[in-house]
Image: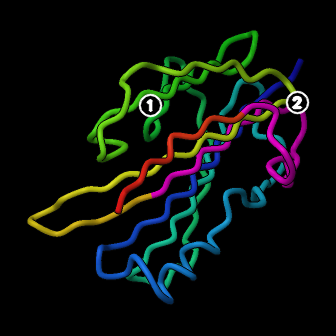
Amino acid sequence: MNHFSVIQIIKTSWTKEHRGGDSASKRNTVPEALQIPFLGHPGEGKLLEHRAAFNEWEGFVKHEKTEVSHPKKPLTLEAIRVQLTENGAEITYRYDGYRVGAPSRTDYPRSFVVKAGEWLHIRYNGRFAWEGAWSYRKVVINVALLEEANPNIFVGMPTKSFSDMANIQ
């Protein structure tokens, strides 16, 4: 089979000063899945990585980029580890305070195998302190294994999902 993997990372960031009101309303409109900007099949065993950022200080306007790579070894992206195998994509989520943020959570990995035609939806959030100021982040990671380009792969219900959303007030 001629498979390739797609990983979409949607990151939303904001500060303590903008937790409620209009900023919260804008922040809550950030989607958990976006159309993938394909330019065709990236190639057997390749990884198409689509990143989108929505930041409070930029009015939650979408900034995105797409890259294609051919990872030969496990890859760490945000709080997940990706290992591409002949059987699919092995995805492991692990909480750590540096990548995910506060509050502390159970520190044991959650592992998933994504096979051809399936997709996995992971979401988590965290609070960070930097030079005495609080910031907050929500990260959504969608992972699929495909045989052909499908820009709408993440529209609809995922095959598998995991949520590690904490109360970050």
Q: Which residues are magenta?
A: 138-160
Q: Position of residue 169 (x, y in %)?
A: 35, 63
- The residue at 71%/24% (across/down) is 45
Q: Quadrant of residue 155?
A: bottom right
The reply to whether dot 1 and dot 2 touch (C-beta < 8 Å) is no
Residue marked by disc 1:
76
- The residue at 23%/66% (across/down) is 134
- The residue at 79%/54% (across/down) is 38
Amino acid residing under circle 2: Gly
The disc, 1 or 2, on the residue closer to the chain's N-terminal end is 1
Magenta segment: does it hold 141? yes
Above or below residue 72? Residue 39 is below
Residue marked by disc 2:
117
**Residue in the foreground of this view, choosing between 10 and 97:** 97
- Mark 2 neighbour density, 10 Å: few (under 14) some (14–19) many (20 or more): few
Q: Is residue 74 left or right of residue 38?
A: left
Q: Position of residue 46 (x, y in %)?
A: 68, 31
Amino acid residing under circle 1: Thr
**Residue in the foreground of this view, choosing between 128 and 21:** 21
Q: Farthest residue to the bottom: give it.
A: 22
User: What is the C-alpha distance between the residues marked 1 and 2?
Assistant: 22 Å
- The residue at 62%/35% (across/down) is 162
- For mark 2, give the secondary structure: loop
